[in-house]
Amino acid sequence: MLNCSRSYDYGQLSEEGFYDLPHGMLATVVTHLEMRNRPPEKERIGNTGIQIEHSPQISVDDYRAIYRQVGEDWLWFLRMAMSDQQLTDTIHHYLVDVFRLLVDGKAAGLLELDFRANGECEIAFFGLSEDHTGRGLGSWLMSEAIEIAWSQSIARLWLHTCTFDHPGALAFYQKHGFFPFKQEIELVKDPRLDGTLPKHAAKHIPMIAKPTGWPIQSGEHCAAT
């Protein structure tokens, strides 16, 4: 008979090496970037059929629809897990601005600016639906975001991205004038396991089933004969 047990103590991850994740958890490296000076204003080129729509009273259903349309492939789930009241309190806050990118009148992207911290703005969410990438719309929307944010009295504009995101996201933000200043490792529960997101979401991130006969939680034991 073989008896085995395993516990997990991540501490501050101060030692090099590999660390097992408990079942149902995912790990991602988060990079924070900032812009501390307003960039020179660029010539704003008009695009036929393309506009940015300020949506201060967007409904919960409409918000979730564009959030999922843009973010499902990249495992955006935080707002999907909120109750209707929690989401309403956030997106209708007077210091939070929600915008939709419209292409020929249809929603194609999401921009959310959060001014709740004094003197700064966070680009809380930014992205395009998959069928509108690769057309220069991301750069157009980011230019709009930067201009809108710096039109307010702020000293800092910041955002973060992670290794769940599009592989070109970090380089895209740096290209537009953001500088990395901090990295973190974030552990999250896989939102596909409890139905917050569908199981086909974020196909580039493996969804690992619970292993048979191997302990995956602190204090669990397994036995084999």
Image (tube, helix red, strand yellow):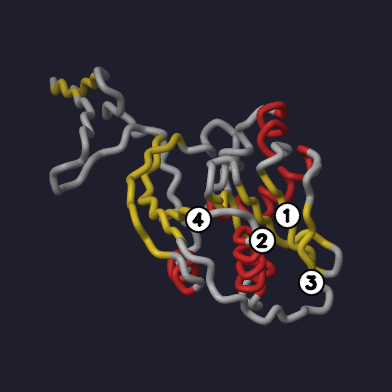
Choose between 113 and 39: the one closer to the eye. 39
Disc 2 element:
helix
Q: Looking at the image, which residue is at 56% across and 47% down?
A: 76
Q: CA distance from mark 3 to mark 4?
A: 30 Å
Quarter that holds the C terminus? top left
Quarter that holds the N terminus? top left
Residue designated by label 1: 99
Res 50 label: 3
Q: Nearer the viewer, mark 2 or mark 3?
A: 2
Q: Looking at the image, which residue is at 43% across and 37% down?
A: 188
Q: Earlier in the sequence, mark 1 or mark 2?
A: 1
- Left or right, 122 with reference to 60: left
Choose between 96 and 166: the one closer to the eye. 96
Q: Earlier in the sequence, mark 1 or mark 4?
A: 1
Residue designated by label 4: 155
Q: CA distance from mark 2 to mark 3?
A: 17 Å
Above or below 10: residue 1 = above
Q: Earlier in the sequence, mark 2 or mark 4?
A: 2
Q: Nearer the viewer, mark 2 or mark 4?
A: 4
Across and down, in percent, residue 94 comes to 71, 39
Q: CA distance from mark 2 to mark 4?
A: 13 Å
Asked if labels 2 and 1 touch by Cβ distance under 8 angstroms, the answer is yes
Res 148 label: 2
Q: CA distance from mark 1 to mark 4?
A: 22 Å
